[in-house]
Image: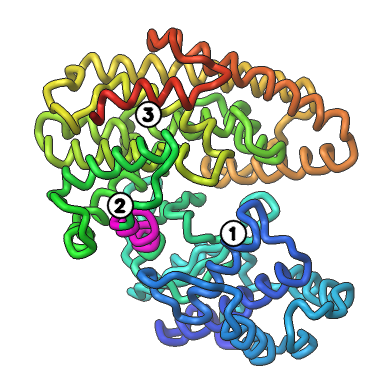
Amino acid sequence: FLKTDTLDREDLEYSIFQQARSLAVALTLYAEATSDWGPSGPDFGRQSVARWLCDIPAKEPCYPSRSSYIEKLTAAAIQYKFPWWPDAIGDTPDNAGIISQLETWLSDFTFQMGDQKYTLEEGEDLDNMLAAQGSNLIIISGYHGTERNLIVGRGTRHRKAPYTHISLETEYLRSPSIVMPIVAMIGVHNIVVRALAVETIFHDKWVAMTNPAWHFSPADKLGFTIKKKTLENYGVSTLSKEMILNIYPHFLSDMQLLLTAHEVGHGIIQHDRLPENSALMAESSQLLGDNILIALLELLADIAPKSSYGQGPILEIVDRIHTEAIQARRCFGLYLSDAYFYDTNTPHMFSYSHLILPVMAAMQSPIQDPGRWLDTNTALALLDDVANWAMAWVKELTDTLYTIFEVTPANSDEHDPLKRYIEKGNALHEALSQKTAHEASEFKTANTYLNHQMPIVYESLYKKLSYTDIDAENQPMALWKLLTPLFS
């Protein structure tokens, strides 16, 4: 092999792209063979792959069952030396043999760059090599729990220590785990915003507003009203496709601001504010499924206080209340709409809505009347108080989980604090994975505990915000009543 440092930009780009594409194909074949598409399920997973494999643009609907998907996946399997893959996916192939060969291939996979090898977890090193050559090709790879994540495209990088902010403007390929609703991601040192995912959501959610027949239930009607008011803040006076399409540049800019701030918020909370052990267990609690800890982490990311490298999205909006009132109104409505999940088929996100919506309502809505905002100092004090409340709950809940599972985070000699956090998190995740696999009683006890605490956490927040009429056992109806006057 040539020495790695002698590879020029063109060599690097070609080698990374070809090897990444073979990995993306293998991961898709594995998902098809095992029917394990991760938490997002087969529909989202196939849509994600079909879009790049069949070159389906964001503005067009995606039908992953179409024959072209099967044909192109089979052709790619042969091209990348998986000839034992059956010609007809789903026709009861020899799954055991296929799975065994794929597992061996995936476990042995490394990126071979010149005379050096890089694991999936070393994607940042590969991306740094590209950046050093002045390339705008971007690779993001690594693990999220046991999921292998991979995405390759082109975009821009902007360093704001300790993170590199990446705007991924085009995408060439991705693993099935990188589904279209994932619009932003945070890695060890990277924060990524996906323009393609933003555009897809824009067409699926906002351009679709021109169809007036989709809102029937109270939840749908309020969600529609919030969206309509938000569009009015962008200058959309009538729900026509042409007018909505015209706002996309402003929409993309606002979304990039808010999404980046949300990921920065995760970094601030989990690395700067929470005790490390609490943050590690809270993230690892994803093994237990959707739970109140995950919702608390999302709330905290939204209201993360200012740090040397940024702040959460709600504080970004507060910063603009008086200096850039038009953008503040746009962003407030946009974020509230994205946090309002009651009109979607994603009930696992309701717990997040239960927390963030009353906090945003307490800020008052700039959509109807900019003067109804709390003054900046009062707003910041409120958000800081809620953040301290949420962090106290995270610590209490995670302390109990450590006791239930009888585990402690492993030590690490890594000097880079972000890498050390990832190493310790992976080790804790692995320890909990083994326990939940072999100790069903501990898994059940932990789930029962978190489920029992969930309404208690809700009630505690509503009392703090003086929303005593919200029923902690039936939030949607009470929150509709709370939000409706703001959008009447």
Residue topped by disc 2: 256
Position in image of residue 390 (x %, y %): 49, 20
Q: Name the quadrant containing residue 347.
A: top right
Quadrant in which the C terminus is drawn: top left
* 10 Å crowding of disc 1: few (<14), some (14-19), many (20+): some
CB within 8 Å, label 2 to label 3: no
Among the two numbered marks 1 and 2 on one chain, the one whose residue lies closer to the N terminus: 1
Task: Determine the CA span between mark 3 and mark 1.
Answer: 27 Å
Among the two numbered marks 2 and 3 on one chain, the one whose residue lies closer to the N terminus: 2
Residue type at mark 2: give it: Gln
Task: Determine the CA span between mark 2 and mark 3.
Answer: 17 Å
Overall secondary structure of the magenta section = helix
Task: Determine the CA span between mark 1 and mark 2.
Answer: 23 Å
**Nearer to us in this view, 151 or 122:** 151
Q: Residue at x 21, y 16 (%)?
A: 377
Q: Secondary structure at mark 1?
A: strand
Tell me, for residue 303, which label it has, or none: 3
